[in-house]
Amino acid sequence: MSQPYLGGQPLTGLAPGAAAQALGAHLRRTDAAIMSRSSHLYAMISSDDPFQYLGGLAAAARSAGKAAPLALYASQLQDTSEATTETAQRSIAREMQSRYLHPGWLQAQQAEGYAGTLQVLKAVQYAWGWQSVAPDTVRPDHWQSFYEVLVEDRHRLGLPQWLRSHPQAYAQALERLVQAQRHGHWQPDTATRRALARLYDELTTNTPLTAELPAVRRWIEDALNAATTPAPAAKGLAIAGPAALPPPAAMSAPGILLQRQADEPAVASTTQPAAEQLLRVLLLLLMAALVGGGAAWQACQQRHTTF
């Protein structure tokens, strides 16, 4: 909070910038920072405090010239008899799966109407906050999962329809997905980028954002233009039809040369009759065995009757 201390006592009257220099010197030789959690309600992404303070220390250490990333940890003190400490990455990953990507949490937000959409937006916003100050705390699959859950409706909860009823909150959440892709934290495929661009453009056309990021708008326009621009023809080849292509001998064909082989003779016509003959023989033998067995049984019955 910009207040330097020495020996537990606050220092006053320092020259401008002296406190920042002292903090930087301290962070450059610091190995790790730890934050304690004693509540099940407030977690790593439920508010902006964790990424501002714990994540902010990582950003400050990096800005001060620390070579290795500052290791970040969360001490879980909800149950004092089983206190544990884990990395910030692991804590965030578990929170993603148990809250913001979990159908139970999402259904609870739907029940809250507009207030629920703000909680969904905050989850995406605060994940972006962590990504910005401590890039290794949020994984690419988290952004992919946000897209699959909020746009593709992976849980089949009707989330896109619900979020569309509050387009500005929905558009702001999608804006963070665009930012994650722009900054290289997430590399979705072409179809995903186009679908994301179309949905964002639709939402902001009907209800424009009051503080839209110009870089995001340029990304949207580029993605939409790429979706409508036909692929260029190969250099030196006409596109009128197959007749305009050069003969195969003139084309470069690296790799294995495929040559047509003579068709193998059909074997079904020779093997099938043999199989049918074998089946008939087996049936005749079975019938003969049945007839013979019946005759033997009758003879045995006659002998018993005579005695």
Image (tube, rainbow, N blue to C red):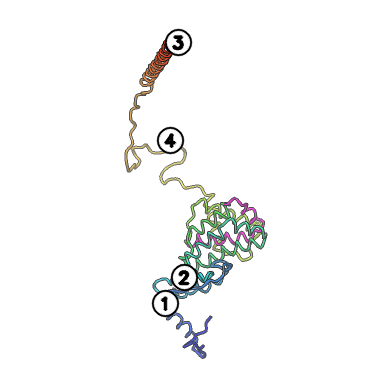
Magenta region, residue range: 155-183
Quarter of image, res 108: bottom right
Horizontal relation, residue 169 to residue 71: left or right: right
- Amino acid under disc 4: Ala
Check disc 3 and report its element: helix, strand or loop.
Answer: helix
Contact check, label 2 and label 4, Cβ < 8 Å: no
Q: Which residue does the numbered mark 1 point to in the structure image?
A: 30
Mark 2 or mark 4, earlier in chain: 2
Look at 59% across and 65% down and name the residue there. 122
| Viewer-closest of 213 and 46 | 46
Name above or below for residue 100 compared with residue 292.
below
Q: Which residue does the numbered mark 3 point to in the structure image?
A: 305
- Amino acid under disc 3: Thr
- Amino acid under disc 1: Thr
How far across and down, in percent of the image, does residue 44 sit?
A: 53, 67
| Viewer-closest of 74 and 22 | 74
Residue 174 is labelled as: none
The answer for how far apart the CA atoms under marks 1 and 4 are is: 70 Å
Name above or below for residue 301 compared with residue 148.
above
The answer for how far apart the CA atoms under marks 1 and 3 are is: 109 Å
Q: Which residue does the numbered mark 2 point to in the structure image?
A: 73
Contact check, label 1 and label 4, Cβ < 8 Å: no
User: What residue occupies the far bottom of the structure in this picture?
Assistant: 13
Mark 2 or mark 3, earlier in chain: 2
How many neighbours does mark 3 have within 10 angstroms: few (below 14), some (14-19), or many (20 or more)? few
Mark 1 or mark 3, earlier in chain: 1
Mark 1 or mark 4, earlier in chain: 1
The answer for how far apart the CA atoms under marks 2 and 4 are is: 66 Å
Q: Nearer the viewer, mark 2 or mark 4?
A: 2
| Viewer-closest of 136 and 33 | 33
